[in-house]
């Protein structure tokens, strides 16, 4: 008979505590991600390579420090009990502290200053039913149907479950919210509450949710968090891999994101004093992998040629099926996607930027929309057509795979400038510097190219070489991993206690990423017989676009310099597009109309793209 | 830190073993019903009154014997470790034996000698899809939709989840089973398997399932079990009470029955070598409470005046919503009900007996259908109308609330006869006698009325009184609970080791029950201005009807003697009706057509009924 006592693990994050039983001998990353409600990022997917799944052991008996941890953590850190969760196990009770999951902000240009347009496709119906009696014993369902005699309405089973209470609490008066022949909600009496909806943008890195009044279009609240699936890998590909590794993994990924979204909705409801049953509609956009995972669809064939999603069709799903606690009849609109790597989030940008309406009218002036995230998706509108492609740009511009990279969080360096030989920088929310976000990296790299510290081929001078030339910035060059690195912030000023560096390896990552984007733009233009001069506007979507300095982007060759002056940042265009499709059924249908006029160019099989990619590898001189 | 070891419980039933952890201090009935897959009947709902939740402790440490158990169990039984599960807790590890849950048989007249009629509303569609390529990257969903171009088909999310595998395994050939614009199943290639459906009849006591080939109408297999909800009470009212006692109880009841049904389907599939994904359709009937519990709808207002069900409407539900593992798109047809106490099971009888078609044609000759179970439901067809009522007859005819009563199981005494002064009896399947089923009780009571042992008022002679008269059966009278009882079988011959008795109290139960039914029949006839002579046929539905001797029924006044010669047993009419509605959509619609022509008479508020009830209380002389 086993009488060994179970190991108890105590976890703290942001002052919240959790106690749990460590049943298996799995690593702590596994325990933390499956058994606690907390969020931990694990960009390498728990393979012990990225060094980002840092936890602090406050007390107890962890497994011994591994060599891999010695390589990825500094001795001072190890001395403070910092460990990598994916390489550490519990050998006795433990008390663990997780870094606060910093809430990404970065919705600078998504302020909803005015209510968004609503299209009035919702109808409210107030019914007075005859109360039942021994002489009139019709069931609640039959009673409701006969009061609705002229409408052929479907009552979903989830509503049937609530029916008896709703009818009796309202003393046989009930208010229905209808969309076409669907009952979205059924309330007691004639309630005074609001009728709300929520738009959701599931990004690989960040999930954002926006709460609206469905009748006035008024924006009530937003909530944005790091995608809780981050614990299974930073990018789309590592999450797909994880989903294929075990039979329950897909369900686990689905549960993770749905629980997170439900929690975000819950928080917004609480803050605004709205009851979750007053939320009757949702609209969910995201890249195809995120949408597949949220719907529990296998992304297997997205990852292998010829890259086929299960669905790119628009869907209407009961919120209940996605375990979202909205009104009993609530529906989730899932707008369509273009292909395996161009999703509803991109179409949402096309809608939000106004390109969609121009395409619908057949009169779109040539314009580009670029979303630089883990992938760089690029679409070109022209006349009545949209052409789309997706480049595997990698997550460098999101700060991933960059030594001191961070997302668009408080303390991220988003701007670097030089006056004389003095370097200065700003950070998001003016917090003490934590690392670089994409815009900061682009700024610094542009500046190092101008200063001759990095050359056209991407090679960084060593400190000795720079010193030999008497370069004023020479002393900021250090050696890191036997290669040069440029130190922007010293350990004493950084909030991590470590210097903030741009390494030779970081430059290489950026170089590959920007070449992919630049080559993608040129492939689309060539295919449509257009030149840079024809493009009227280049819309830059995503958090990155908010912060990016167009001159720096042109300097490093991310955006062709001919287009540098035409950049217009559209902020969180995906969230905006989702919100518009939430508030207007017509806009929801607009996604599908645009998608039907879209051609997709598969770059992986395009010889032209390969050639341009190599050409774009150099930095502009 | 608690280091107390959990208690392990070992349970055996029918040779199957189960080990579980006894986490709470709940009684064993609670543990056995929630944590083991076994079935235990608890007619009093675990209140320690019925004495039927018997278990045998083989070894270990149970809680001490209670006074209530001493009252309900004999010393020899206690000595053998027999205990009542609802009054016993575990104080240490236990090994428990449960009586085999005898599978009720009793489908004597439900043999499906010939295939049932099918109406060809199902369509099979074989599609050859163009395989995807880098030049044709449409999603699986889009590819399927465009191959179906001319049909406006809805693909439920459960099917989307299977889509990628199904299409690839069939090498882009797929076979769809359609009903109207619903895809019931989607299979790889052109499979050779069968297309099956399952009809389910959820009785309060017994659940029966029937497997059919949907194309040929051939009956493939049946399975019948005691309703696993029995552990929460024998009758509708005690289950409703249980559902209201705690917030999770309704879910628990729902889970119990759905898990049982899924298990029954699983067993039939295994026996017939059919894959569960080949079962694409189901049809589920039952009394309104059973249907509410299976759908997770609260039966609260069924139990209190004015007796209003949540729904009596026909429903089409995804099998997935009811956690039945059929094909991904499978649909469950739930035929409509009449009222809180006249359900789809009764309408199924009306359909199976042929009364429904006659009503539809407007030419029904006056005929009655009676289903005597926990309630006695009675319907009268006449012309184009049906009139229905339900009497709270109680479960006496199902053997519940009868001292030695059992259901229609092997060993149940179903026939008692008298030749001279010799009594003889037969049992179901000729097994050693276990107790009385309803038909046996009626036979014996008829015989005791004839013999003058029970008089018109229901009073049973004491042994002394009978002996004084020199009655030849006097020695069979004993004293039980200070009242007379008639012993049919001695302890030495009975399979329980205890004599099989009909007690004075049993006679009272039967007396109340038969009065309710007889008064119900007369109320219906009066309301329609008909007399006994007008009735052409009296259909007797339910297992009881199979075994009942019409003469005995007339003798005790259960059926008016004028109708004694017009009885026709229709066996498991509910199962037959469900099967017909499974195989034919037209028949499914027929339920609704009949229901629209049905009037319901609420007996609880009928002064007429009350009067007739008192009149019928006496036994015929
Ligand atoms: S090192 Fe642990 S997740 Fe990457
Ligand atoms: S005595 Fe235990 S259930 Fe009735």
Image (cartoon, coloured by chain):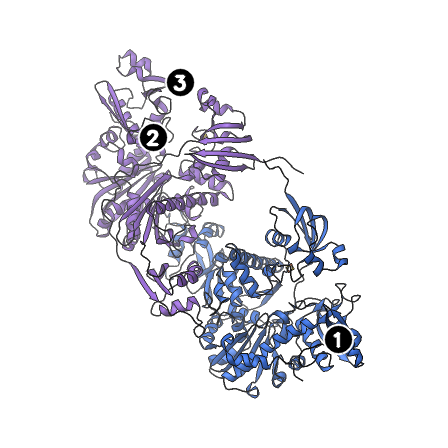
Chain colours: A purple, B blue
Q: Residues within 10 Å of mark 1 (few under 14, many from 20)?
A: many
Between residue B57 and residue B296, name the one nearer to us: B57
Quadrant in which the C terminus of chain A appears: top left
Q: Residues within 10 Å of mark 3 (few under 14, many from 20)?
A: few
Q: Chain of mark 1?
A: B
Between residue B173 and residue A261, name the one nearer to us: A261
Left of A36 or right of it: where is B552?
right
Q: CA distance from mark 3 to mark 2?
A: 21 Å
Q: Is residue B150 above or below residue A495?
A: below
**Residue A513 visible in the shown view:** yes
Q: Are marks 3 and 1 on the same chain?
A: no
Ligand 1, by image quadrant, is top left
Image mark for residue A482: 3
Quadrant in which the N terminus of chain A appears: top right
From the image, state whether disc 3 or disc 1 is nearer to you. Answer: 1
From the image, state whether disc 3 or disc 2 is nearer to you. Answer: 3
Dot 3: element: loop
Residue A255 position within the rendered picture, expressed as x and y whole percent measured from the top left: 45, 45
Residue designated by label 2: A512
Q: CA distance from mark 3 to mark 1?
A: 109 Å
Left of A147 or right of it: where is B81?
right
Left of B262 or right of it: where is A528?
left
Dot 1: element: loop
Image mark for residue A23: none
Residue A548 position within the rendered picture, expressed as x and y whole percent measured from the top left: 26, 33
Q: CA distance from mark 1 to mark 2?
A: 103 Å
Residue A186 position within the rendered picture, expressed as x and y whole percent measured from the top left: 37, 60
State whether label 2 is within 8 Å of ligand 1.
no
Residue designated by label 1: B462
């Amino acid at each position: 008979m086993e009488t060994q006592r179970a190991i108890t693990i105590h976890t703290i994050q942001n002052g919240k505590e959790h106690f749990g039983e460590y049943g298996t001998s799995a690593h702590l990353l596994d325990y933390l991600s499956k058994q606690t409600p907390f969020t931990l990022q694990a960009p390498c997917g728990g393979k012990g390579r990225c060094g980002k799944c840092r936890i602090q052991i406050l007390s107890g008996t962890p497994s011994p420090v591994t060599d891999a941890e010695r390589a990825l953590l500094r001795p001072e850190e190890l001395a403070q009990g910092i460990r990598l969760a994916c390489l550490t196990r519990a050998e006795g009770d433990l008390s663990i502290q997780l870094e606060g999951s910093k809430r990404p902000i970065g919705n600078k240009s998504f302020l909803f200053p005015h209510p968004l347009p609503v299209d009035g496709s919702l109808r409210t119906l107030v019914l007075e039913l005859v109360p039942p009696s021994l002489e009139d014993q019709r069931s609640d369902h039959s009673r409701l149907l006969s009061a609705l005699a002229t409408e052929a309405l479907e009552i979903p089973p989830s509503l049937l479950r609530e029916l008896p209470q709703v009818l009796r609490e309202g003393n046989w008066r009930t208010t229905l919210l209808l969309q076409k022949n669907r009952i979205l909600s059924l309330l007691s009496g004639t309630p005074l509450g609001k009728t709300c909806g929520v738009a959701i943008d599931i990004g690989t890195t960040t999930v954002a949710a926006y709460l609206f009044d469905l009748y006035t279009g008024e924006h009530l609240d937003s909530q944005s968090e790091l995608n809780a699936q981050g614990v299974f890998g930073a990018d789309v590909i590592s999450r797909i891999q994880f989903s294929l590794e075990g039979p329950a993994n897909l369900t686990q990924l689905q549960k993770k994101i749905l629980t997170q979204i439900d929690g975000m909705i819950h928080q917004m409801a609480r803050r605004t004093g709205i009851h979750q049953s007053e939320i009757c509609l949702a609209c969910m956009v995201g890249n195809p992998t995120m949408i597949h995972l949220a719907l529990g669809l296998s992304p297997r064939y997205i990852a292998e040629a010829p890259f086929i999603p299960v669905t790119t069709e628009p869907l209407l799903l009961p919120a209940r099926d996605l375990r979202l606690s909205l009104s009993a009849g609530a529906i989730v609109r899932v707008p369509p996607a273009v292909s395996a790597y161009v999703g509803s989030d991109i179409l949402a940008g096309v809608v939000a930027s106004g390109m969609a309406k121009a395409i619908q009218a057949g009169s779109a002036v040539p314009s580009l929309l670029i979303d630089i995230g883990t992938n760089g998706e690029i679409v070109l509108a022209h006349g009545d057509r949209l052409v789309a492609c997706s480049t595997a740009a990698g997550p460098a511009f999101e700060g991933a795979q960059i030594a001191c990279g961070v997302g668009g969080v408080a303390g991220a360096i988003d701007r670097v400038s030089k006056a004389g030989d003095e370097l200065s920088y700003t950070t998001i929310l003016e917090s003490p510097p934590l690392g670089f976000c994409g815009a900061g990296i682009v700024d610094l790299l542009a500046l190092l190219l101008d200063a001759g510290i990095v050359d056209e081929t991407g090679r960084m001078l060593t400190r000795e070489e720079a010193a030999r030339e008497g370069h004023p910035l020479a002393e900021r060059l250090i050696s890191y991993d036997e290669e040069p690195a440029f130190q922007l912030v010293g350990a004493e000023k950084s909030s991590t206690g470590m210097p903030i560096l741009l390494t030779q390896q970081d430059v290489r990552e950026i170089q590959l990423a920007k070449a992919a984007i630049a080559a993608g733009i040129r492939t689309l233009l060539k295919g449509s017989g257009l030149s840079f001069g024809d493009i009227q506007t280049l819309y830059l979507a995503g958090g990155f676009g908010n912060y990016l300095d167009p001159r720096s982007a042109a300097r490093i060759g991310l955006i062709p310099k001919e287009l540098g002056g035409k950049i217009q940042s559209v902020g969180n265009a995906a969230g905006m597009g989702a919100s518009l499709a939430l508030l207007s059924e017509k806009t929801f249908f607009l996604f599908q109309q645009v998608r039907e006029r879209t051609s997709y160019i598969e770059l992986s099989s395009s010889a032209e793209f390969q050639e341009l990619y190599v050409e774009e590898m150099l930095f502009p001189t």
